Image (tube, helix red, strand yellow):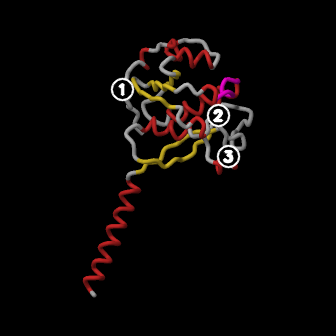
Amino acid sequence: MAVKRWATLLLLGLAALGAVRAEAQRMTLLVYYSNPRLAADPTDCSAVVARDRSVPLAVGVAAAALQQLFAGPTDAEKAMGYRSPFSTATAALLKRVRVQDGTAYVDLHDLRAELAGATSSCGAAEFQSQVQRTLRQFLPIQRVVFAIEGQPRIFYDWMNEGCGPANGDCDARPFATSTQHEGARR
């Protein structure tokens, strides 16, 4: 009887240890969505509000956060007033993200058809503020430069923005690397 009790306690202990390990292998990230109900100015399309996401522990935290962002708000979040140009249709939007010298280079798959509203003035503000704020939670990211299929000019033309110092003059060289460097740390 004592052996059976000891074995049961051992199994319960191992199960608890497994649950702790499983929880320890997760991390919480923030994604930022628009919510006019919570914004100081409900007409400000660039105003965003943080939402927690629990994800498996990852070295590439910037990529993990963007993948969560690009999947869009959950149904429960939508019911609470959160909105985004991102949805399940854009969940695979991220091609890669590379962080170098305080700049996140975000290379996107060409899903412009799924993001038709993203080029309106409000849509562009939502798109860019949600991505930028989600990435700026990580040090040392201070600036975000976008590309579609490695071409920043395609992205900025789509957004009706010119090339200049703020977007690296649409230089495609930072996107040419075939390896993903993930230097962002929380």
As drawn, is 130 to the left or to the right of 21?
right
Q: Residue at the spot x=39%, y=24% of the render?
A: 100
- The picture places residue 116, in percent across and down from the top left corner, at 67, 27
Label 2 vs label 3: CA separation?
12 Å
The numbered mark at residue 117 is none
> Which comes before the other along the chain, label 2 or label 3?
3
Residue to which mark 1 is pinned: 179
Residue extending furthest toward the right? 43
**Which amino acid type is marked by label 1?**
Thr
Query: Around disc 1, counting alpha carbons within 10 Å, would you say few (fewer than 14), some (14 to 19), or many (20 or more)?
Result: few
Compared to residue 89, the image places residue 21 above or below, namely: below
Q: Which residues make up the magenta segment?
A: 115-120
Tell which of 140 and 135 is nearer to you.
135
* Residue 161, quarter of picture: top right
Q: Residue at the spot x=73%, y=37% of the render?
A: 42
Camera-near label (3 vs 1) is: 1
Mark 2 and 3 residues: CB-CB less than 8 Å, in contact? no
Residue to which mark 2 is pinned: 85
Residue to which mark 3 is pinned: 78
- The picture places residue 49, in percent across and down from the top left corner, at 61, 41
- The picture places residue 70, in percent across and down from the top left corner, at 56, 36
Task: Tell me the SS state at disc 1.
Answer: loop
Q: Residue at the spot x=40%, y=23% of the render?
A: 101
* Residue 117, quarter of picture: top right
Label 3 vs label 1: CA separation?
36 Å
Tell which of 31 and 143 is nearer to you.
31
